[in-house]
Amino acid sequence: MVDTPAPQRRGLDLLERAKELDSLDVTIFVPCRNEEANVGRALQEIMETMAGYPYTYEIIVIDDASRDNSAATVERFIAEHPNVKILFRRNPKPLGVSYNFGDAAILGRGRYFRMIGGHFQDRAEAMRHGFDQLG
């Protein structure tokens, strides 16, 4: 068995946002890897669901080195919805959802944190069930 060192966190840029912690109500993390056909619909569903709540929120999308056009889909969504706070990061190599979850949790400014998949499986009903419990 060969021990492979874990990749080092990109610490300084993550810690810079730490001073903004809790400046929003909700941070929604959307992991994405090869979800070109789904990630735009997932973001739309999140935006429409959150419109029914008084919460301030941000969406953090981390593309985990997709080989399709997922990144372009996310960038197009951001351009078409400038009023939605979306932080988009692209990994140059796959790091895995657990690693990206940790990065998003550090980057997030929300008091509450929720992961909603970029695969468009977390539909509005399921999102509302979670968001109805806040506070």
Image (cartoon, rainbow, N blue to C red):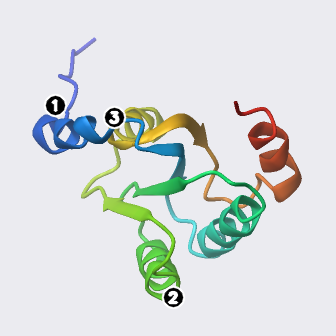
Q: Position of residue 101 (x, y in %)?
A: 45, 37
Say above or below: 102 vs 88. above
N-terminal label among 3 and 2: 2
Say above or below: 13 vs 33. above
Residue type at the position of mark 3: Ile
Q: Which residue is the site of mark 2?
A: 80
Check disc 3 and report its element: helix, strand or loop: helix
Sort mark 3 into few (<14), some (14-19) or many (20+) by Cα contacts within 10 Å: some
Q: Is residue 86 in view from this perspective? A: yes
Q: Is residue 32 in view from this perspective? A: no
- Residue 8 - label: 1
Q: Nearer the viewer, mark 2 or mark 1?
A: 2
Q: Quadrant of the N terminus?
A: top left
Residue under the point 22% across and 15% down? 2
Q: Are marks 2 and 1 in contact (CB under 8 Å)?
A: no
Q: Quadrant of the C terminus?
A: top right
- Residue 106 - label: 3
Residue under the point 70% across and 59% down? 50
